[in-house]
Image: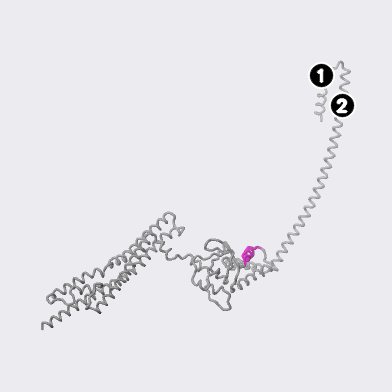
Amino acid sequence: MKRLVISCVLAALVPLAQAQPVNLDELLRDIREVRSQEQQVMQEREAAFLAERDQQQSRVEAAESELAEIQAEADRLKTAFDELETALAEGEAELAQRSGNLGELFGVVRQIAGDTQSQWQDSLLNLQFPERMNRLDALSQSRGIPTIESLEQFWFMLQQDMTASGKVSRFEAPVVGLDGEQQTLPVVSVGPFTALQDDHYLIYQPEADRLLVAARQPGGRGLIDDFVAPRDTLADLQIDPTRGNVIQQIQLTPSLMERARQGGVVGYVIMALGVLGLLLALARLVWLQRTSARVDRQIDNLDRLSDDNPLGRVLGVIGNQPKLEELDTLELKLDEAILKETPKLDRWQGLIKLLAAVAPLLGLLGTVTGMIATFQAITLYGTGDPKLMAGGISQALVTTVLGLVVAIPLLFLHGLVAARSKALIQVLEQQSAGLIALHLGGEERKGE
């Protein structure tokens, strides 16, 4: 406060000093006036300070009063919170005591709902009852106590599934045809086992919730029309007891041509050789059969020799009435004629036998190349994905099978062709020997 007064006095003296009063009386008067003004200002400031102090004191008292009220309210709320927490604990204990084993029961219900959901995931009945999977999911994922309504609903869904499993139902569902277009068509379902549309078996796709016409239809399609048609009697139908797994496996099973294509270039070569050997063997069998028939006709009519069969040509070298002086060389002429006919009868037998021997060797070649491709796939990609090795393994196995499939029939056909030709050659030898004996016997009788 003193410093403030001194500062005011000095501030008042500065303009006085600059004013340079004329005499001391004026100076004294000015000082008195300045001091009077300063006292008045100081009084006003002091009054304002006191008023401000009183106001601050009032505010402090009001804040303390409000704080006391708030503290009292906080104490009251804390007391109420403690009371409610105690009541909640008592209520939970009472609930646990009253519920007893119901908590375990509800846990079993949730588990059964989850198991049922996994079993119904790929069921055809989902197309008829599309909402049941969502209800099962809500029940299995629930963390609260199931209500009586939800339990009754679960029981009703189980009853509904059992009832529908023994019925033949007709309804409309999305069906994807062989052309890839999806249409809503009338469908006939035999419980959860088989779905039919026209004369086709259908495959259920649970991820898309639709049906797909099977590209490879199982047997018994002729029974579908009689089964689907309106009737008063029973009708036969082939169904899939595995709920579609058999039809799915049929789609994955490769056909004969697909298996042949798995053999690659080596497989095609083996099949080409097999076809060639088969055609040669069949052609030779047909030719030998026709030749055997002509020989049989010639045996029945030895008086009229014909050139359309080996026996006629063999016997024709000596004629019907050989000269007596030629009987010494008769056997040699007949042997020469038989030797000329033998290559015609044995034609292509060596090639058929060669093809039967080469086919397994080519199968072994395909096996080796397939295993090389398999090991290369293992070197590049490891053994994590079996599909990368499937091509080499398929070639290795298929070519071996193709080689054996070609070789075994060709060996049998070669044996059959060789037996037929050998039988004809034996007939020629027998008839030649008989002819020689006949002429020799006639010569001896004439000599007697």
Residue 106 magenta-drawn?
no
Amino acid type, residue under disc 1 in the picture: Gln
The image position of residue 262, as x and y in percent, is 41, 61
**Seen in the image, is 390 located left or right of residue 97?**
left
Q: What label does residue 18 carry, if any?
A: 1
**Image x and y of residue 11, in percent:** 81, 24
Dot 2: within a 10 Å radius of its alpha carbon, few (fewer than 14), some, or many (20 or more) residues? few
Q: Which amino acid, mark 2?
A: Gln
Give me the residue at 22% from left, 78% from top. Answer: 303
In the picture provided, is 62 more to the left or to the right than 119?
right
The rendered magenta stretch, by its main secondary structure, is classed as helix
Q: In which quadrant of the rendered image does the C terminus lie?
A: bottom left
Task: Kindly state the secondary structure of the residue where label 2 is placed.
Answer: helix
Q: Position of residue 5 (x, y in %)?
A: 82, 28
Separation of marks 1 and 2 at Cα, in angstroms: 19 Å
Residue identified by numbered label 2: 37
Mark 1 and mark 2 lie on one chain; the one further toward the N terminus is: 1
Question: Helix, strand or loop at disc 1?
Answer: helix
Residue 387 image offset from top left, x and y in percent:
45, 59
Asked whether residue 301 is in view, the answer is yes
* Crowd tier of the residue under label 1, counting other residues whose Cα lies within 10 Å: few below 14, some 14–19, many 20 or above: few
Q: Is residue 131 in the magenta section?
A: yes
Residue drawn at x 13%, y 77% is 324
